[in-house]
Amino acid sequence: MLNELLHTNLTLGKVAAVCGATLPAGLDGDASCGRVLTQAVYVKPGDVVISAGWYFDQRIIPPALEKGAALVICSAKAAQQYPDPRVTAVDDPQEAVRRFQRWCAEGCRAKRIAITGSVGKTTTTGLINSVLTKCYPTLTHHTMANSHGAILRNVQKLRPNHQYWVQEVGGVQPGYIESTAKFLCPDAVVLTNIGESHLNLYKTKEGILRDKASLERYAKPDAVVIINSDDEMLRSASYTHRVITCSYADPAADYHAEDVRTELDGVVFTAVCKDGERCEIRLHLYGEHNVYNALSAVAVCRWAGVPLEKIARLMADYHPDGMRQNMIHVGGYNLLVDTFNAEPKTVLLSAQTLEKLPVPEGGRRIFATGHIDKLGEHSPEMHAHLGHDLAKLQLDQVLFYAGDSRYAYDAMVADGCTNALMFTDRGELDDWLRRNVTRQDVVFFKSGQFEAALAKTVDHVFGTSFQNEQQFNNGDPVTTPDGFKLRLRMDGIAEVEGYTGAAADVVIPATYGEHTVIRISPEAFKRNKTMTSVVIPDTVVSIGEEAFYSCSHLTSLRLPAGLKIVGKNAFNYCRSLKTLNIPEGAIHLDRHAFYDCKRLEIVTIPASVGFIGEEAFGTTVQRSRKVHFHCVPGSVAAEMAAHLPPPRPLSQVVEGKVRRVAKVVTKKLAGQ
């Protein structure tokens, strides 16, 4: 059966038969069902869930049933614990998953590319995707979709027209990857490196290697394995397939790099192939260790038949996002955010990257890191060793937060460093950053997403939303009695996603139960024609893109005291607004934030605003008879307003002095 038909006609009876399960007597085998899943967090009514043993049954079965799962397949022991008419048992739930995966892939001829390693696998996957998706019909996935559950969801998207399937594979415990390898049987395997992530369960690096290398052991007979030959464990390992080697500098490797350098926009190097072909590669990635990721991607794409020059051109368009290697400029501040995962080696590489980055005149290199998760019983010694290594670098400030990072801090102090600070309270860390970071500094945040979780600190201080990228943080949607559509996320955070009410005077709630409303999501109130006034609670720190776009009857706007960011087009075409008071502490007004608000008469912008995007007030000035900009001399707002030559007579007020002004132009602080 072709894959398209297979997925549009999925029934409970078919799923049970494919998985080797007996359908409970009370269920209709012809009843349609949704997706087949292994993680309860993604369940919707009508889905089928297999509790495969990768997570505790109590974390899967009860919430799946509560969310309306039509069928749950599990072990006999679990079925006895949860006697429900929708629960059925099989001898081996993991084999049930593989049977369903194989069935989904029937009739599909896509070559399968599997990428794994302790670190670098997500970046390598992204670089491969940036090329293959532009050259062939390719099945891929969003970042971090590398678990058993994610791979199961991905295979249900596989179609006969796909020529390649690019799949990142993550591991957390012995046998985890091998269970996937038995089904995946890849045509190409990429092994990035063997590090120290998840030593708490793997116990040894040899255990990590064995699990990750299982992708090669179960690969198709004519498959290739692409390795980082500078990694001692990978170089010394035995393989049963053809090996393609990638090295930073070894000319004997199949691929190596020359002329490696760090520029303002990222790493640049020349990729040299063993057959003599070479080409310059430009990456929007920071850290020369990304050369390994890029060379592995080059090897995969050339194996797939893509010319080297085309690979280089397409890779140049790749930009990381979310919590991984993401250089952002918000409110004029320069931040490099890499807070999804960490191990001692990657923390050191990140600090070395910062050491080489250019900074604006008068700026400092500030490195913020913290407790490294899942290192096991040797965590204190590993943190201490990292601290001694960090002590050798030329960094202006090193900030440590939480847990065993105390040992890294102590090591730096023991080595005579005076540039290290230790924080055990997140609020104190946040306050230090607010008081001390300037717009000439470059701040690199490097951590995992659990104990240190520096994404939270970035969000607290700068109003960003990196916390939304945390695993299993999709959140739960709710609608309040007065029509506010909220999404409740981890850490007690709520976001306003929409509004179904009809009130003219809208007061957005500050809390919902134990959750605090801190963001207005993109398009939340877009084109609302009944709202004439809105009060946004002081808890809100960011207003998303087009959140109030074309709310044409909005005459009164009360912005929150805690506001940091106003997104692109947030109040575009709010043509009834007359006054605008940006609160002290706001830092970022994005492109077209208040575009064509033609009735504005008074705009107050504090000195805290460090970035005003392109035409943030575009055509507002031209269409209004008079606009008074109240701002502080020398501020970004004052510089913007000073460059407004009018098509009509207008005024600007700067500490009581009136000037004639007109067209808006973007102004950034020097060095951004």
Image: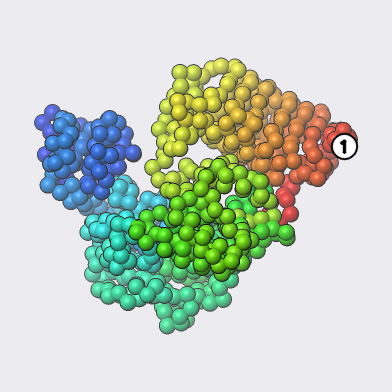
Q: Is residue 552 above or below residue 326?
A: above
Residue at 13% over, 36% down: 80
Left or right: 127 as drawn, with respect to 102: right
Left or right: 671 as drawn, with respect to 451: right
Q: Is residue 353 above or below residue 42?
A: below
Give the camera-side residue of 534 and 163.
Answer: 534
Image coords of residue 407 (percent x, y): 47, 59
Image coords of residue 194 (percent x, y): 36, 67
Give the camera-side residue of 429 and 240.
Answer: 429
Residue at 25% over, 38% down: 58
Residue 55 visible in the snapshot: yes
Question: Which of the 4 image quarters holds residue 250?
Answer: bottom left
Image coords of residue 90 (percent x, y): 13, 44
The C terminus: image quadrant: bottom right
Question: Which of the 4 image quarters holds residue 617?
Answer: top right
Identify the residue under disc 1: 660
Give the camera-side residue of 142 and 327.
Answer: 327
Image coords of residue 205 (percent x, y): 32, 66
Q: Is residue 103 above or below residue 257?
A: above
Amino acid of disc 1: Arg
Give the camera-side residue of 209 and 280.
Answer: 209
Q: Secondary structure at mark 1?
A: loop
Residue at 12% over, 47% down: 91
